[in-house]
Image (spheres, rainbow, N blue to C red):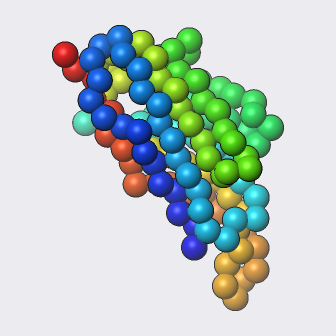
Amino acid sequence: QVQLVESGGGLVQPGGSLRLSCAASGSIFYIYAMDWYRQAPGKQRELVAHITSGSNTNYADSVKGRFTISRDNAKNQVYLQMNNLNPEDTAVYYCYADIRAFRNGIGVSRDNYWGQGTQVTVSS
């Protein structure tokens, strides 16, 4: 079974920084894109940052210049460095990955996987 586990969330003051990590584990054959999404209370989940297997990146306009997504393919991990945080960044942050994995009785299949989420709160 494939699992995504996020870490690194917490409470930070405006202008501060946090680094989120997401580790993928299980019978992984290949990881394609890896993304970070966030969902604030009362709002829809939104894409924050996207990184391809070749490390091409895209960002939401609201985080450009402040957030940096990166990945370590050898470790099956993706990171989100968040700088100059403001209260509008407060949300639950979710890791997403497009993974081809071994599945019992099926062989190799490609599916989308989500982590459980990590809370980021920006407040003074």
Residue at the image position 69 percent from the left and 42 percent from the top: 72
* Furthest residue toward left: 124
Please state the horizontal and vertical placement of residue 17, each as a whole percent of the image.
41, 20
Q: Is residue 47 visible?
A: no
Residue at the image position 69 percent from the left and 65 percent from the top: 28
In the image shown, does 28 or 57 lie closer to the viewer?
A: 28
Q: Is residue 116 left or right of residue 28?
A: left
Classify 113 as above or below 64: below
Please state the horizontal and vertical placement of residue 11, each as a whole percent of the image.
27, 29
In the image shown, does 73 or 100 lie closer to the viewer?
A: 73
Q: Is residue 90 left or right of residue 38?
A: left
Classify 66 as above or below 116: above
In the image shown, does 4 or 58 lie closer to the viewer?
A: 4
Please state the horizontal and vertical placement of residue 20, each as a whole percent of the image.
47, 36
Image quadrant containing the C terminus: top left
Q: Is residue 104 visible?
A: yes
Q: Is residue 69 left or right of residue 106?
A: left
Residue at the image position 32 percent from the left and 40 percent from the top: 119
Please state the horizontal and vertical placement of residue 83, each as a whole percent of the image.
46, 17
